[in-house]
Amino acid sequence: MSALTVDHAWASGHEYTWDELVRIWEETDVPEGCTVEIIEGIVTVVPPPSNVHNLIADLVHRSLYNVIPVDWGVFQTLGTAVISRRGLFIPDIAVAPKAALLDAESEYYIPAAAAELVVEITSKSNAAADRITKTAGYAAAGVPFYLLIDAWSPGGPTVTLYQEPVGEVYRVHHAVKFGDTISIPKPIGLDLDTSEFPDGV
């Protein structure tokens, strides 16, 4: 299944304001299991993830809860807004202080800058957005760590940790093949064993 564009603002010649985009995002009715994101000012419906995708998300989720502070949470459906890039992403996993959710202006998303770590697990249909658009968006927001789990990488399934964002660019901290361990520094402090990651996301 591939992502579906709900609205082409450019087709009508009208560029929506952030508030208009969020209203469309909130009002978009989608099938159960799908998510709605705003990617570069376009409201997009993302199909449900595969079973393998969900298994990887669960493995990462469980590992994170062993190391993060008790006042942080691990969330799999948390909206993260990057207003400067007209983006509202739903990362596969976001680690953020619980207070950030309570203090957010919206009841449906937080500023991406409030996240300590975001994790995206590519699907065949969304790999380019995760590798390029979201990487730039999370960097622009100043998210300290971005973990990209890319089963569709041209060189074979890889896990890449990005950190030290400057502008819209991250430094690649480390990249490993599925099966190896990747370390996320403090304050996360996780040695993530990817040996149980199945192929075929």
Image (cartoon, rainbow, N blue to C red):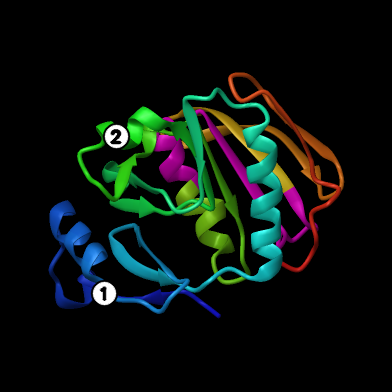
Residue displayed at 49% across by 74% down: 47
Label 2: few (<14), some (14–19) or many (≥20) C-alpha neighbours in 10 Å:
few
On residue 102, the disc is 2
Mark 2, secondary structure of its residue:
helix
Looking at the picture, how far across and down is residue 197, in whole percent? 79, 54
Q: Quadrant of residue 122?
A: bottom right
Q: Earlier in the sequence, mark 1 or mark 2?
A: 1
Q: Name the residue under label 1.
A: 7
Closer to the camera, 83 or 67?
67
| Residue 201 location (% of width, % of height) | 70, 66
**Amino acid type indicated by mark 1:** Asp
Tell me if mark 1 has few (under 14), some (14-19) or many (20+) residues whose alpha carbon lies within 10 angstroms of its own. Answer: some
Q: Residue furthest front?
A: 70
Q: Is residue 162 above or below residue 83?
A: above
Residue 50 x %, y % = 64, 71
Q: Which residue lies furthest to the top in this view?
A: 186
Residue 70 part of the magenta segment: no
Measured Cα–Cα span from mark 1 to mark 2: 30 Å
Residue 157, percent across and down?
77, 56
Q: What stretch is highlighted in magenta?
A: 135-158
**Viewer-side residue, 47 vs 127:** 47
Note whether 60 is above or below 77 in the view shown: above
How many discs appear? 2
Residue at left 29%, top 34%? 102
